[in-house]
Image (cartoon, rainbow, N blue to C red):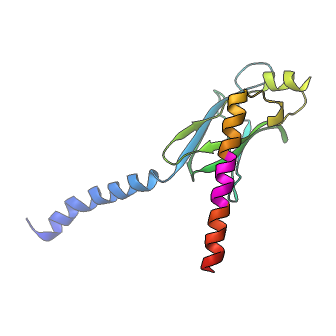
Amino acid sequence: MSLIRKLALILPVGLAFFAVSGWAQTAAIEGVVKGSDGKLLQGAVMKIDRLDVRGNYTVKTDKKGHYFYGGLPGGSYKVAVVVDGKEMDSMNGVPIKIGDVARQDFDLSKSAAAAGGGAPVDESGRAMSAADKAALEKKNAEQAAALAKNKALNDAFN
């Protein structure tokens, strides 16, 4: 078998390997959005903002109220539902790990009830258990420590 034929067989396999390994370096987020009437919400804009490093992404919900955004770097994100230009609900500090698909669902009927009507709410209107709050605070403290360490190393290097 000639060298060219061997390369023609090996090259596609090698390229596929690198494509798969590159995809493994990213993450995704998905979820379902229900409107204030409890029905699946089509065409809502999902704003996905990275909190630790600047990054802003948007995607719309499909006819089944589902959204999916892939190719995200790992980190901490704020995910918000925007309807008619108004932020109706959001969740701050959503952790997205490399190689995983994070899930964040929204039910605007529950958000509206928590806010006392149809007014937009933020993550402070969302009830969290004491264990969830403690885990979130611990994670935020770990991230802050890691960022401080990285800054110190960067300052020392420069």
Magenta span: 140-147
Q: Is residue 41 left or right of residue 20?
A: right
The reply to whether residue 12 is visible in this rendering is yes
Q: Nearer the viewer, residue 84 or 138?
A: 138
Q: Is residue 124 left or right of residue 19?
A: right
What main secondary structure does the magenta stretch of the protein show? Answer: helix
In the image, farthest residue toward the left = 1
Determine the image quadrant of residue 90: top right
Q: Nearer the viewer, residue 32 or 121?
A: 121
The N terminus: image quadrant? bottom left
Image location of residue 104, percent across then percent down: 65, 34
In the image, farthest residue toward the top = 38
User: From the viewer's perspective, is residue 156 above or below residue 86?
Assistant: below
User: From the viewer's perspective, is residue 154 above or below residue 26?
Assistant: below
Residue at 20 percent across and 66 percent down: it is 7
Residue at 65 percent across and 52 percent down: it is 143
Residue at 39 percent across and 52 percent down: it is 20
Residue at 79 percent across and 29 percent down: it is 126
The C terminus: image quadrant? bottom right
Image location of residue 2, percent across then percent down: 10, 68
The reply to whether residue 66 is visible in this rendering is no
Q: How many marks?
A: 0
